[in-house]
Image (tube, helix red, strand yellow):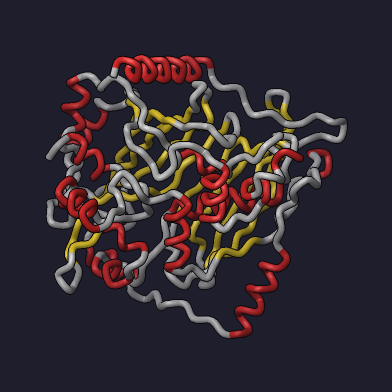
Amino acid sequence: MSDDTHEALKVDESLEIEIQRALAHHLTDADIERARLTLGWDQPARTQELYTVASPDAIRNWAHGVGDDNPLYTDEDYGPRTRWGSQIAHGTMAGFIKTPLLGDRLPEEVRAANKGLFRGVHVFVSGGTWEWFRPIYPGDRIFSFNGEESIEEKASEFAERSVIRVRRDVAINQRAEVVGVYRIVRVLTERKKSRASAKYAEIEPASYTDEDYAKFDALYAAESPRGADKRFWEDVTVGDVLDPMLKGPFTVTDVQVFHMGGYGMVPYGLKSNRLGFKNRLRIPAFYVKNEHGVYDVAQRVHWDSEWAKGIGNPMAYDYGVMRQGFFYHHVSDWAGDDAVIVRLEDSIRRFNYIGDTQFLSGTVVGKRQQAGQHVVDLDLRMTNQRDVETAYGAATVALPTRDGRLPRFPQVPAELADKATQMIARHNQLLHER
């Protein structure tokens, strides 16, 4: 198995995907020690996403992929009338628009430590933290580099053994400006299928009456982005409650729209016909036959309930990144056009199954001044129709003040700004040497 193939297999951006069921599912002391050798090394991201440049259409489609109709993101004629002077992108798009970044390979000993690391172990993303430093504008080309930041062994509720790995992804534009930093929390487990099945066996598919839909429709009708109506810092009080937001009921169509928005195409690659054949040769372990003997991607757990049942879940389920987008949508609607979302943290605790409905709530839990900015801290929650909390999060938002001060994005740490400049300079050098 090539290094590129293994890299594609071990990086899992979904909530939970079974990658190599036929291989041994064991975490070893040797693998954990080898993983520690990879800490602190950044490497250029060579993958190419569905979108490499933030065109107005790409920006709109990403927002629509999470159900966000805020004209700041979706209407290129609206943005010029705001403080930004242009349409800008939904913050979470920074992690999923990407041009391959040319750069130097990692040292041989680090690459050797990565080779075959945690092969066959179950991987899922349980959440992450975003920090933003500038908006994405139409025409921006986004690159990224990443590296492992920490690794910790931890007891798990439903696994024999688990390891928590945090990877830092840095998104930069063509001017070497840092757009955002995304720290991804990945959980590696030795989960036993029988124990997983028992955990979810009693979950029944959701069903709704006309009266239920009348309530949903009323909630949707009451929602709207705050837009140009400034939310001033002075007017916010600790204990204030955000207007509720609804997401759902969740359908396979929602998954398709999210894919069209730009998610899910890499590192594995959703491809068809001859391209699908070539992709299956590249990463054969990612393709598993269905009950009719037809090869299909393991990623189909997100739209194929029969396949999801085969790995211990009662139904198909969403991507965790979708709910990260839901949280951002909720905060952005509340904060208004002039605000700056500085930080967003999310933790995905339960699956969002086909048919489920998510109810978003939030509370102001802090109000302070930070580095000359006037910020508020938000506690965020997401609960389904079974009254089960499926995700929680936190956000820090900088707000305008009544004396006319507009919030700014934080300053990029000097070390990180220098690293971004070096990465783009090396990319441009290698590009010209081709």
Quadrant in which the C terminus is drawn: top left
Quadrant in which the N terminus is drawn: top left
- Asked if residue 55 is positioned above or below residue 416 in the image, the reply reads below
Q: Residue furthest right?
A: 403
Q: Residue at x 69, y 28 (%)?
A: 408
Q: Residue furthest bottom?
A: 210
Please indicate whether residue 199 sits to the left or right of residue 53 in the image.
left
Return the x and y of residue 417 as percentages of the image width and height: 50, 18
Near-viewer residue (110 or 337): 337
Return the x and y of residue 97 as percentages of the image width and height: 45, 40
Return the x and y of residue 431 as percentages of the image width and height: 34, 20
Residue 396 seen in this snapshot = no
Near-viewer residue (283 or 38): 283
- Asked if residue 379 is positioned above or below residue 427 in the image, the reply reads below
Residue 424 seen in this snapshot = yes
Please indicate whether residue 196 sits to the left or right of residue 380 in the image.
left
Please indicate whether residue 13 sits to the left or right of residue 118 in the image.
right
Q: Residue at x 60, y 85 (%)?
A: 210
Return the x and y of residue 293 as percentages of the image width and height: 14, 70
Q: Residue at x 40, y 19 (%)?
A: 423
Near-viewer residue (187 or 306): 306
Q: Residue at x 61, y 80 (%)?
A: 212
